[in-house]
Image (cartoon, grey):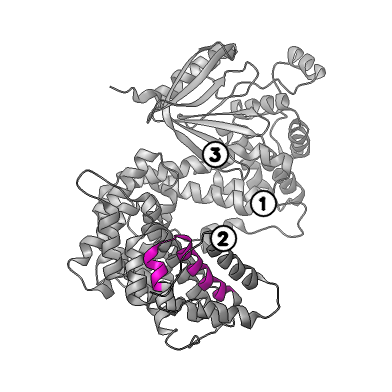
Amino acid sequence: MTDTRRRVKVYTLNEDRQWDDRGTGHVSSGYVERLKGMSLLVRAESDGSLLLESKINPNTAYQKQQDTLIVWSEAENYDLALSFQEKAGCDEIWEKICQVQGKDPSVDITQDLVDESEEERFDDMSSPGLELPSCELSRLEEIAELVASSLPSPLRREKLALALENEGYIKKLLEIFHVCEDLENIEGLHHLYEIIKGIFLLNRTALFEVMFSEECIMDVIGCLEYDPSLSQSRKHREFLTKTAKFKEVIPISDPELKQKIHQTYRVQYIQDMVLPTPSVFEENMLSTLHSFIFFNKVEIVGMLQEDEKFLTDLFAQLTDEATDEEKRQELVNFLKEFCAFSQTLQPQNRDAFFKTLSNMGILPALEVILGMDDAQVRSAATDIFSYLVEYNPSMVREFVMQEAQQNDDDILLINLIIEHMICDTDPELGGAVQLMGLLRTLVDPENMLATANKTEKTEFLGFFYKHCMHVLTAPLLANTTEEKPSKDDFQTAQLLALILELLTFCVEHHTYHIKNYIINKDILRRVLVLMSSMHAFLALCALRFKRKIIGLKDEFYNRYIMKSFLFEPVVKAFLSNGSRYNLMNSAIIEMFEFIRVHAFHLKKP
């Protein structure tokens, strides 16, 4: 049986200060000859490959956070984190790290002495701790100066953080904050702003747990309202208590979960809106704040996912015809945010998350929502659909094929997606571009499965060309009944270019399905009508479509092209282009050069 205590997820901090998931595996510690020391090793649970091999450096500062996290910096700009499935496993590895570094495992950070000067080293020997001034209103300036002077030195930061932890100092500062507000002591409030901001830059989880507690967090935000560089104080507490309302779309019965959601929102607000934009120096000192928010979100999704009653009620109301539009919009927005948070889960938990959504009927629910008039609701539903397609396109394909056995073509989910793409009113077609990307993923054979008794590619493409392709090509066929496009405005041209892009992808990847469709429906002739468009990008899309067909060197296509005189529109476009040396000129010459080099015998049958 696998030892779940040692099961971990490896994270690295990227250039945008966001945590990237590097995989799940099992951690061990042991002597590595190549590294000449005790090291942490993580082997992937999928194939046993090495996800992490990191020597436990005696001078590296390791941090233990939230009982199941160990975080450290491997190099100047390379932060690592191990997220343990169980607290016992985290404690076990933490003891190994502390043993190598000669530390007491009761600490939650090991000292970093790398950057200290000789003077600081001497100071450390003569003064093992840091004595804080008594927490009084008259000494706020002295406290602010002490915090500011400690920030540049890792050793002094460590001493200051330990002193703040041991003396319950933060709560005493917040008591003085109330006194300063009552007395309207602006100078004292400015000092408190500098002190609290400095405490954030100590980058210490134990301090954050005090500051972000239900008891303290609003007072911390209050201190940060009095930025001395601003002429007026900000009203962050007023916004959080009066403007930003916590709305439970489905009642949450677990008080711990509710508190965690409140805390995460407020901490995110502090990071995004309250703290000033950090300098490069300060950015590296706020990594623990980023981690605190990230792993809080992981915990929230996990707790919601395990609340079966909550999810059952959510889907019941989402699909109930009696649910009013405003309520349904709130439910859809919540589900969208829920799916976004799920991206932080470990793979096996994310699998369970999406299987749960599927079993509860997320796809038929989205079908109902996409048929509504509310553009905002449809947009949120599209985002949810994109999470499902990106996570498991096969699950979506299986649903739409089963659905086709009971419903007409015009109400199939995939055809609703195509219709929304075609009817996008955005001048830049932002929604249409997103939907076209999802369609491309769904029709891509590279992510289709093949088993001994079933080939998804054969089944799904057969379904798609029978039930959906006519919906996709309808705007193209409607606009090319004459020698020139019947509508040639910019938005129509953009839409047709998108459709051509997908059809070109199909020519490359679908072989006989698309070939039969093109030849039987005379699609290439219709596409080449677009070469007379006033929009050069659309004319080039039409030419690219034909070039892709010729590039296949398929005899059936070749005969179809010659029999139907389908070089005529290309030659006309070349002559119409005249002596201009542009993309159209180059693309047409390249096409004929390709034909010459490959010596096709394109003769009339």
- Mark closer to the observer (2, 1): 2
Q: Is residue 327 visible?
A: no
Judging depth in this view, the residue of 574 and 353 nearest the camera is 574
- Mark closer to the observer (3, 2): 3
What's the amino acid at mark 2?
A: Phe
Ranked by sequence position, the earlier of labels 2 and 1 is 1
Q: Is residue 583 left or right of residue 554?
A: right
What's the amino acid at mark 3?
A: Ser
User: What are the residue bounds of the magenta stretch?
Assistant: 537-560
Question: Which residue is disc 1 drawn over?
Answer: 181
Judging depth in this view, the residue of 525 and 464 nearest the camera is 525
Q: Secondary structure at mark 1?
A: helix
Q: What whole-number distance in Å separates the C-alpha atoms at marks 3 and 2?
A: 25 Å
Q: Secondary structure at mark 3?
A: helix
The residue drawn where x is 58% and y is 37% is 288
Q: Is residue 548 magenta?
A: yes
Ranked by sequence position, the earlier of labels 3 and 2 is 2
Q: Is residue 332 left or right of residue 170?
A: left
The spot of residue 388 in percent (x, y) is 36, 55
The residue drawn where x is 33% and y is 70% is 517
What's the amino acid at mark 1?
A: Glu
User: In the figure, 89 relative to 459: above or below?
Assistant: above
Circles 2 and 1: CB atoms closer than 8 Å: no
Question: Which residue is disc 2 drawn over?
Answer: 239
